[in-house]
């Protein structure tokens, strides 16, 4: 497998936004999967996506795997940054990627595109059902749901980060988070910490907002705020979803990503006539799949989801 970086658009200051494109060089025409990383729309990058999943998609299933960086809140509100970039990279995969990838000895089939994601990235993957040219299928790992509803648990205090020291939100912190970089570039990559390493400023700020129930207000604000646009449930009444598989940890207590919320979304999508499958994972918490590799207990669930995507591009 080889991985290259290809620009798919420019930010508001004219800097490239890139996708990491992974593939096995072949004369065969390959399907495309776009994988949106998690991180609460404020952190993470293309390399947040588990490498084992990318390798399985590219090497075993024969996909061209596109993992985009997208602009991170709060330097730009999420509906105008991450969400817009998510739509744009999908359109880029339809129009430009098949040409660009030929220069690297491979061939992509733009009629066979699927999407997947993790946590907030899974929400982006689901929302792509509303694109002008939607994907053939969508795989969701513990997506964040119902955030546009006032009684959603994302708007209430959460004790999951109580072990962290209090976060002091100073003017300097606000300037570092909300302002573009000195050259005007909009941040599109902030690596998540490795296990056992302390989280950086942006991660601590995000965890603090999650603890206070203010996450959505901090990433979607001002006169252009549109939190409903970030919520996959908004599209249930206005979009015909392609086949969907949702993989959900039964012990996931992350607000917006609990089993109860996923089960509710599945019921409502089924009531709309949607083809949706829920795969519950006993004892699994949020981000349970990040470190799993083939051969380990639990990988079979991930493999089932990835094969689900493959089945819909045959």
Image: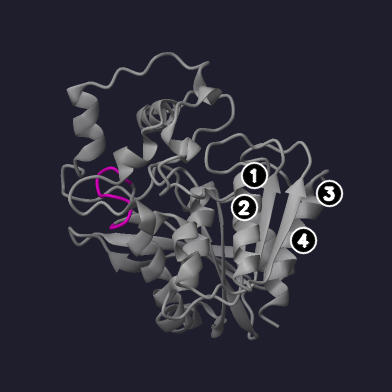
The mark closer to the camera, 1 or 3, is: 1
In the rendered view, would you say 190 is above or below 3?
above
Q: Quadrant of the N terminus?
A: bottom right
Q: Determine whether label 4 and label 1 are within 8 Å by CB.
A: no
Q: Determine whether label 1 and label 3 are within 8 Å by CB.
A: no
Q: Which residue is mark 3?
A: 295
| Left or right relative to 18: residue 311 | right
The earlier-in-sequence mark between 3 and 4 is: 3
The earlier-in-sequence mark between 1 and 3 is: 1
Magenta stretch, residue numbers? 73-80
Q: Which mark is residue 304?
A: 4
Q: Which residue is mark 2?
A: 264
Image point (72%, 40%), residue name:
250
Q: Separation of disc 4 and disc 2 at Cα?
A: 22 Å
Q: Main secondary structure of the magenta part?
A: loop
Q: Quadrant of the C terminus?
A: bottom right
Q: Which mark is residue 260?
A: 1
Tell me if residue 121 is in the magenta stretch.
no
Image point (24%, 26%), residue name:
173
């Amino acid at each position: 497998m080889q991985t290259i970086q290809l620009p798919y658009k420019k930010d508001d200051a004219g800097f490239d936004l890139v996708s990491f494109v992974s593939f096995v060089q072949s004369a065969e025409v390959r399907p495309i999967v776009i994988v949106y990383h998690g991180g609460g729309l404020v952190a993470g990058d293309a390399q947040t996506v588990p490498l084992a999943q990318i390798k399985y998609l590219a090497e075993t299933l024969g996909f061209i795997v596109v993992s985009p960086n997208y602009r991170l809140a709060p330097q730009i509100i999420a509906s105008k940054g991450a969400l817009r970039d998510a739509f744009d990279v999908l359109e880029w995969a339809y129009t430009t990627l098949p040409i660009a990838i030929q220069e690297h000895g491979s061939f992509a089939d733009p009629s066979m595109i699927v999407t997947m994601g993790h946590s907030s990235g899974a929400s982006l993957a689901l929302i792509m059902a509303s694109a002008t040219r939607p994907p053939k299928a969508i795989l969701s790992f513990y997506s964040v749901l119902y955030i546009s509803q006032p009684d959603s648990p994302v708007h209430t205090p959460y004790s999951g980060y109580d072990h962290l020291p209090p976060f002091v939100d100073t003017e300097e912190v606000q300037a570092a988070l909300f302002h573009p970089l000195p050259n005007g570039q909009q941040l599109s990559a902030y690596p998540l910490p490795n296990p056992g390493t302390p989280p950086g400023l942006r991660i601590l700020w995000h965890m603090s907002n999650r603890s206070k129930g203010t996450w959505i207000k901090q990433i979607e604000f001002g006169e252009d705020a549109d939190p409903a646009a970030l919520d996959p449930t908004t599209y249930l009444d206005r979009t015909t979803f392609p086949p969907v598989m949702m993989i959900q940890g039964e012990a996931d207590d992350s607000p917006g990503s609990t089993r109860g919320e996923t089960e509710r979304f599945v019921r409502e999508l089924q009531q709309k006539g949607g083809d949706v499958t829920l795969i519950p994972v006993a004892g699994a918490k949020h981000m349970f799949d990040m470190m799993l590799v083939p051969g380990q207990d639990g990988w079979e669930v991930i493999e089932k989801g990835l094969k689900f995507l493959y089945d819909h591009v045959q």
